[in-house]
Amino acid sequence: MITGAGRGIGAATAARLAAAGARLVLAARSEDEIGAVGEMLRKQGASVIAVQADVSDAASAEEVMEAALEEFDRVDILVNNAGIIWPLEEVADVDPEEWLYNILVNLGGPLLFTRNILPLMLDQGYGRIVNVSSHGAITPIAGASAYCAAKAGLDMVTRASRWKWRAGGITVNGFYPGMVDTAMQEDIRSVDTSESRFDTSYYHDAHARGELLPASLSADLVYWLVGPWSRSHNGEIFRVEDEAWRERVRSDLA
Ligand code: NAP
């Protein structure tokens, strides 16, 4: 089950896991995007359902779970990937509703999906949960207080989970993908700096220098995190710039 699977890291992860033989449940708000990803993967022989959902909404999260069980009977892997960057404004300027919606999506979404899936995984005696976090969790980004707060909270959920479910065969890990060439980075570069105090120059420069990472790299890292190679890791946060980890992933997946 992959949230935010309509584009970017989620879509690349769906393709990676489908190629490895996984049956997939794709969720996101844009029905056309997850529909298109599902269609493409079905043509390649994968078994896929696409369920339109807003991860911040409890009823939506339950509908995804119900659809998954109806189609596949079990869920072994949950990738909490859906995320938004907005609002990108200083605390003093920000619309509180927009701020809180960010928290509901980036932090509340993983909580709802994890909560729904846990009883099933405990019954199965097996489960792999990956929380897609961000450097924003540990590096304050001026103007992105909601995003940073939500990702910091998500890391704490990941870490706090380590004691609880290991005995039930479930592991929960998170990772920081780095700056990835997706719509989220386009969103950041699109900020009108004459209207917002958010500074986009760092992101424009990285893009201009060709430094953005491909989503396929994140997909490989998720594959490693849900595969047998990571079984001794639980409640940990991995970082893409950790060369030793990336080398291990490269060699394990080779
Ligand atoms: P993206 O291309 O914008 O894709 C985000 C996905 O999440 C889309 O499928 C989007 O679909 C879905 N989504 C957003 N809000 C949702 C909601 N309320 N309910 C359901 N689905 C929702 O972004 P991305 O770069 O691939 O980001 C994926 C994850 O990586 C995010 O958690 C992000 O924070 C993290 N990340 C990205 C970067 C980066 O540089 N790109 C860096 C660090 C961390 P809809 O809009 O149709 O719902």
Image: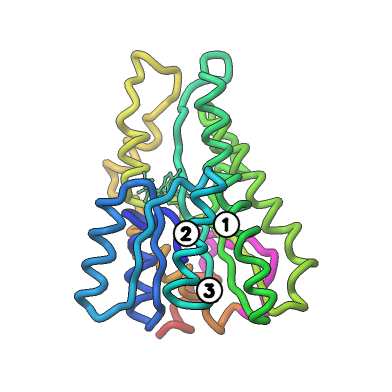
The spot of residue 124 in percent (x, y) is: 64, 81
Which portion, as a residue range, is magenta? 231-243
- Residue 154 in the image, given as x and y percentages of width and height: 63, 49
Q: Residue at x 23, y 59 (%)?
A: 36
The residue to which callout 3 is attached is 75
Crowding near pointer 1: few (<14 within 10 Å), some, many (20+)? many
Disc 1 vs disc 2: Cβ atoms closer than 8 Å?
yes
The answer to whether 78 is drawn above or below residue 184 in the figure is below
Residue 54 shown in magenta: no
Q: Nearer the viewer, residue 251 or 21?
A: 21
Q: Is residue 233 magenta?
A: yes
Residue at the image point whose x is 59% and y is 60% from the top: 174
Q: Nearer the viewer, residue 179 or 18?
A: 18
Asked if disc 3 is less than 8 Å from ligand 1, the answer is no
**Amino acid at the residue labelled 1:** Phe
Based on the displayed image, in which of its 4 quarters is residue 190 positioned?
top left
The x, y position of residue 2, in whole percent, is 45, 62
Label at residue 113: 1
Packing grade of label 3 (10 A; few <14, some 14-19, many >=20) is: many
Extreme-right residue of the structure: 163
Cβ of disc 2 within 8 Å of ligand 1? no
Q: Is residue 59 left or right of residue 34?
A: right
Quadrant including the C terminus: bottom left
Location of mark 2 (residue): 64
